[in-house]
Image (cartoon, rainbow, N blue to C red):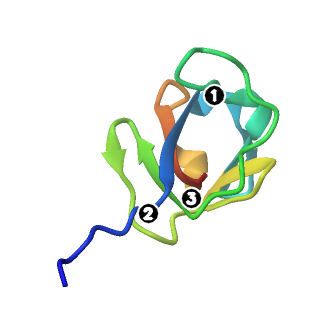
């Protein structure tokens, strides 16, 4: 029997916001989903349900545990120290 490829049925969704869009809470930075735009520059209302996500700050991928993501908010642990101009990029693997 020949081997076959199993399709993962995932799409990549990308969202962008500047660090200045967030609110500092203690040492953390909270950025509401409504502060993000998609690949087309359209504002979003919520992050979709996802299988995984990757966080990039100023173009550098961040390790697991640096942030939490809900449908309404991204929280970057220790993010209060970020420069307000730093770009925040979230890539989500979304099942379809």
Q: Is residue 41 above or below residue 2?
A: above
In-image side of 63 versus 95 (left or right):
left
Q: Is residue 90 visible?
A: no
Tell me residue 69's x, y (percent).
Answer: 67, 58
Viewer-nearest of discs 1 and 2: 2
For this orientation, the residue located farthest to the left is: 2
C-beta proximity under 8 Å, tags 1 and 2: no
Residue behind mark 3: 78
Q: Which secondary structure, mark 3?
A: loop
Q: Is residue 17 above or below residue 90?
A: above
Tell me residue 92's x, y (percent).
Answer: 54, 50
Q: Residue at x 56, y 58 (%)?
A: 78
Please tell me the numbered disc located at residue 20: 1
Q: Label 2 to label 3, Cα distance in Å?
A: 33 Å
Q: Quarter of the image containing the N terminus? A: bottom left
Q: Residues within 10 Å of mark 3 (few under 14, many from 20)?
A: some
In-image side of 96 versus 10 (left or right):
right
Please tell me the numbered disc located at residue 83: none
Q: Which secondary structure, mark 1?
A: helix
Instruction: Please tell me which residue lies in front, 28 or 48.
Output: 48
Please tell me the numbered disc located at residue 8: 2
Q: Residue at x 67, y 29 (%)?
A: 36
Q: Residue at x 33, y 37 (%)?
A: 59
């Amino acid at each position: 029997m020949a081997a076959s490829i199993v399709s993962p049925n995932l799409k990549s969704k990308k969202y962008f916001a500047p660090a200045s869009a967030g609110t500092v809470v203690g040492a953390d930075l909270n950025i509401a989903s409504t502060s993000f735009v998609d690949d087309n520059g359209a504002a979003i209302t919520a992050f979709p349900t996802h299988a995984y996500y990757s966080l990039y700050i100023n173009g550098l991928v961040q390790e697991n545990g640096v942030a939490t993501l809900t449908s309404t908010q991204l929280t970057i642990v220790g993010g209060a120290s970020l420069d307000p101009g730093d770009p925040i990029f979230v890539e989500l693997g979304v099942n379809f």
